[in-house]
């Protein structure tokens, strides 16, 4: 299950006298952070305070999202998405409008080219090249997720 748009809350740790930033997911239950560094003169480790910002990492909106795609934090998520698409036998998409070129490229390169089926559940069919290029692989359920019973969805999905 992937949430393609929205935010992942994280702490951004900024190291004193450095441009280095460290990103930590907020759900670890920790709110105070220290940096452990080895002090060569004292020949022991010491702990330094770091500046923290609570920061939602958004993957929504075309300009901001594109800038975020290649940072290591998201690179690992995209690798996970790629692997899951390649290993999946069926893709069920709920409420995604297919307007994000990078996500669409992932779906195409790591799923659609293998002739695997996609079920799109939404209230409206968007205009998308993927639908035309792979039309035999797409099935659309256009009443929105809340207008199908569980049994109806299971019949159409399986």
Image: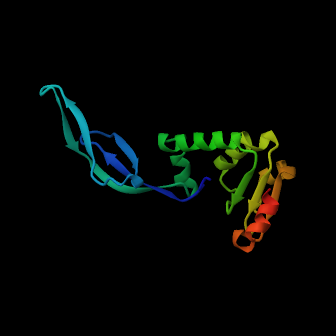
Residue 147 in the image: x percent, y percent?
Answer: 74, 74
Q: Is residue 43 left or right of residue 23?
A: left
Quarter-of-image position of residue 16: top left
Q: Which residue is painted at 15% across and 26% down in the image?
A: 43
> Visible in this render: residue 45?
yes
Name the outermost residue toward the front. 151
Q: Is residue 49 left or right of residue 100?
A: left
Name the outermost residue toward the right. 136
Q: Is residue 47 left or right of residue 155?
A: left
Q: Which residue is painted at 39% across and 46% down in the image?
A: 23
Count the labels in the image.
0
Question: 88 or 108, which is in the foreground?
Answer: 88
Quarter-of-image position of residue 110: top right
The colour style of the image is rainbow
Residue 1 in the image: x percent, y percent?
Answer: 62, 53
> Visible in this render: residue 10?
no
Q: Quadrant of the C terminus?
A: bottom right
Residue 118 in the image: x percent, y percent?
Answer: 77, 52
Quick check: 6 above or below 75? Answer: below
Name the outermost residue toward the bottom. 147
Residue 45 in the image: x percent, y percent?
Answer: 19, 32
Q: Which residue is painted at 71% across and 44% down in the image?
A: 88
């Amino acid at each position: 299950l992937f949430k393609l748009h929205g935010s992942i809350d994280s702490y951004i740790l900024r190291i004193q006298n450095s441009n280095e930033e460290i990103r930590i997911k907020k759900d670890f239950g920790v709110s105070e952070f220290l940096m452990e560094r080895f002090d060569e003169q004292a020949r022991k480790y010491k702990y330094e305070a770091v500046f923290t910002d609570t920061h939602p990492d958004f993957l929504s909106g075309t300009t901001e999202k594109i800038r975020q795609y290649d940072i290591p934090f998201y690179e690992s998520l995209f690798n996970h998405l790629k692997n899951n698409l390649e290993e999946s036998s069926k893709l069920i998409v709920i409420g995604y409008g297919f307007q994000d070129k990078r996500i669409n490229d992932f779906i195409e390169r790591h799923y659609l080219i293998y002739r695997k089926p996609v079920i799109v559940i939404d209230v409206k069919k968007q205009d998308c090249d993927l639908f035309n290029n792979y039309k035999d692989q797409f099935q659309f359920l256009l009443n929105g997720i809340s207008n199908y019973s569980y049994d109806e969805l299971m019949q159409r999905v399986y």
